């Protein structure tokens, strides 16, 4: 456990040395909230209840995008350490192998939560109606963590496999936008064509977003008119997603350190 | 329980707790560095550096070997057999150099001994602990510097050492004391709070050396410690390494393809080529068997006849050939030179180049592998 914390501490220290890296990622989400949010509000206002309701509806989607981007991008730290050979220092140390993966996952989750919360707060400031019950926020943070863990798993698996930061960046792009658009993040599930709805229902982002609308946000304002997916289903689906992806990461990671 | 115990070799007394472990620790011996009189001989069993139980030498077969390997083989793939049956017996408190050209299997051997790679077959132990079955215990007791520089260049030198200590579970005060001691040793005190990215190659190597020593290892592995360094930096690394052995009772296994490095530093040298250790001994032994002088000849003509004739001369000790070079080990080069030249003339062998040198490890390498070891 102390090895996990040491690795986490080291990654946080590096983040302090290069704050622009984290900053750049937040900026992207900020632009989403501000530009897209305001634009869509005037365009779609009527369909989803008008005014701040669209903001309340949309902010969880942007938070999911932020979390996804942060988590997938977080894998770059591990990729860099692998390419530079720093992993050998860890492998020669008397620490359990899994703590290397654990330390990476923990630092990814930390960054993910940090960036997501910034966007959430910003969203509320701009006009989204937040949930007044702190328990809701607690639940939302759990959802975000589990959702982030899933993508951290995908990121760590990929970063254990490739040796090329360029292709890694490609994957971030290829991954994140379709997962955003093929979900209920920007428009209500009911309004989608059947095939898109099926895709959206297979997409963990949908469960994260729907869950966040019911936890971080005032669920009556965030509603698009249709029914929410039950909160417990969101938790279960995301937990399964996290377990599957982290197992995949562990499997690929184990093979990579042979 | 606290008990007085005597080091069986030097007889000095110490008070140690014996409650943690019984007498059967199964071959985990500790080099007695607390008692300088023991001169690094094995004296007491230990766990995590704490003396637990004195070993009874009269009734045990014990090993004073810091590193042992037998029949070590590593096959990376069908075609690549990197290590092909390496045996090692390296005594505690010695400096051992694995000398060999690129691709000889040095790094692979180090990676196996430091538990980063599993051998295909064969076995190895470090401080009496099997490197596969007791990997985690081995890791606790060794230090490593790798062939490539492996440093987080964004961190400062001090942070690099501090994080390293934390991975090994060292306490804060302990880390602090160790860091200032080591920074002084490798003369990096002034640069300690600077980012590693601003360090020169020599400074980085010294920092890596300090990192390898951070956790007070009993055995230090150094893979090409002076690779790519200028002569001045090499000399200072050599100084540190020699001191480590003498003052701290460390065992050092280093690899190198510089023969002068092996000659300067090592108590024993193993010459490794194509995954085999072809010959082993002290640098002196190895060189002396080449004769006290060596004549090198390059030329054209009936080389075979010439070699045959030379061999029959009574004062010639060895004749080796390789890479178009004939090398003759001889009692006294200057005195015998005319005779050798006249033998060549009689055989119709035309000498193009001839020189008399003191033999070195590179001559030994030539003898055993038929190829020259070039410093790159
Ligand atoms: N990871 C690897 N996969 C396949 N072949 C390797 C690997 N590492 C080293 N080799 C090969 O094994 C041989 C020995 O390499 P190495 O142990 O690095 O030698 P040295 O350190 O003496 O230069 C070389 O032929 C090298 O190409
Ligand atoms: Mg090498």
Image (cartoon, coloured by chain):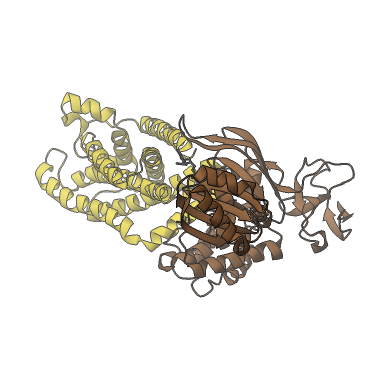
Judge from the rendering whether residue A68 lies leftward or rightward of residue B264; answer left or right.
left
Of residue B341 and residue B38, the one placed in the foreground of this image is: B341
The image quarter in which residue A181 lies: top left
Image location (x, y in percent) of residue B297? 51, 54
Q: Furthest residue to the front?
A: B346
Residue at the image point whose x is 89% and y is 42% from the top: B59
Q: Quadrant of the C terminus of chain B?
A: bottom left
Judge from the rendering whether residue B124 lies leftward or rightward of residue B82; answer left or right.
right
Can residue B212 be seen here? no
Judge from the rendering whether residue B127 lies leftward or rightward of residue A189; answer left or right.
right
Image location (x, y in percent) of residue B270? 62, 49
Image hue for chain A: yellow
Image location (x, y in percent) of residue A152? 39, 42
Image location (x, y in percent) of residue B206? 53, 65
Residue at the image point whose x is 85% and y is 41% from the top: B60
- State how many labels appear: 0
Of residue A9 and residue B26, the one placed in the foreground of this image is: B26
Of residue B125 and residue B360, the one placed in the foreground of this image is: B360
Can residue B183 be seen here? yes
Judge from the rendering whether residue B46 lies leftward or rightward of residue A231; answer left or right.
right
Residue A192 vertical placement versus A56 (above, below): above
Chain ID for brown: B
Residue at the image point whose x is 32% and y is 57% from the top: A21
């Amino acid at each position: 456990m102390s090895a996990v914390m040491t690795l986490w501490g080291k990654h946080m220290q590096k983040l302090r040395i290069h704050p622009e890296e984290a900053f750049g990622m937040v900026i992207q989400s900020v632009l989403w909230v501000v530009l897209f949010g305001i634009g869509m509000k005037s365009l779609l206002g009527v369909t989803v209840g008008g005014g701040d309701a669209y903001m309340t509806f949309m902010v969880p989607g942007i938070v999911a995008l932020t979390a996804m981007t942060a988590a997938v991008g977080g894998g770059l730290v591990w990729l860099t350490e692998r390419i530079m050979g720093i992993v050998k220092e860890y492998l020669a140390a008397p620490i359990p192998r899994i703590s290397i993966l654990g330390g990476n996952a923990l630092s990814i989750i930390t960054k993910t939560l940090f960036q997501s919360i910034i966007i959430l707060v910003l969203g509320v400031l701009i006009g989204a109606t937040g949930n007044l019950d702190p328990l809701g926020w607690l639940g939302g943070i759990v959802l975000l963590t589990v959702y982030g863990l899933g993508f951290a798993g995908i990121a760590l698996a990929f970063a254990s496999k490739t040796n090329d930061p360029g292709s890694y960046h490609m994957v971030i792009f290829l991954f994140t936008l379709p997962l955003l658009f093929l979900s209920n993040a920007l428009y209500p599930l009911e309004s989608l064509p059947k095939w898109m709805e099926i895709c959206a229902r297979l997409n963990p982002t949908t469960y994260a977003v729907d869950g966040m609308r019911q936890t971080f946000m005032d669920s009556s304002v965030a509603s698009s008119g249709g029914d929410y997916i039950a909160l417990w289903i969101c938790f279960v689906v995301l937990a399964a997603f996290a377990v599957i992806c982290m197992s995949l990461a562990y499997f690929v990671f184990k093979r990579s350190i042979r | 329980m606290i008990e007085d115990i005597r080091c069986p070799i030097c007889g000095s007394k110490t008070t140690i707790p014996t409650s943690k472990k019984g007498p059967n620790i199964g071959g985990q011996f500790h080099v007695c560095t607390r008692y300088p009189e023991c001169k690094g001989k094995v004296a007491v069993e230990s766990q995590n550096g704490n003396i637990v139980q004195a070993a009874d030498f009269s009734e045990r077969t014990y090993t004073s070997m810091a590193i042992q390997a037998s029949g070590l083989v590593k096959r990376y793939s069908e075609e690549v057999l990197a290590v092909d049956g390496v045996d090692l017996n390296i005594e505690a408190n010695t400096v051992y150099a694995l000398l060999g050209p690129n691709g000889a299997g040095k790094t692979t051997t180090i990676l196996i001994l430091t538990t980063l790679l599993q051998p295909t077959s064969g076995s190895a132990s470090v401080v009496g602990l099997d490197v596969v079955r007791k990997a985690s215990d081995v890791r606790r007791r060794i230090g490593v510097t790798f062939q490539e520089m492996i440093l987080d260049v964004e961190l400062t030198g001090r942070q690099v050492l501090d994080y390293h200590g934390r991975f090994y579970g060292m306490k804060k005060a302990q880390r602090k004391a160790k860091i200032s001691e080591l920074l002084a040793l490798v003369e990096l005190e002034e640069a300690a709070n600077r980012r590693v990215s601003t360090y020169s190659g020599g400074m980085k190597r010294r920092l890596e050396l300090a990192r390898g020593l951070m956790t007070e290892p009993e055995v230090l592995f150094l893979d090409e410690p002076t690779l790519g360094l200028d002569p001045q930096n090499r000399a200072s690394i050599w100084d540190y390494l020699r001191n480590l052995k003498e003052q701290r009772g460390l065992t050092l296994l280093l690899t190198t393809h510089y023969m002068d490095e092996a000659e300067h530093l090592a108590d024993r040298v193993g010459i490794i080529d194509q995954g085999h250790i072809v010959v082993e001994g002290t640098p002196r032994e190895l060189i002396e068997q080449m004769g006290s002088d060596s004549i090198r000849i390059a030329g054209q003509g009936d080389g075979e006849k010439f070699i045959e004739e030379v061999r029959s001369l009574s004062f010639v000790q060895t004749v080796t050939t390789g890479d178009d070079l004939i090398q003759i080990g001889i009692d006294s080069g200057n005195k015998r030179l005319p005779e050798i030249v006249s033998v060549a003339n009689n055989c119709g062998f035309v000498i193009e180049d001839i020189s008399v040198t003191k033999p070195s490890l590179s001559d030994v390498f030539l003898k055993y592998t038929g190829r020259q070891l070039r410093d790159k």
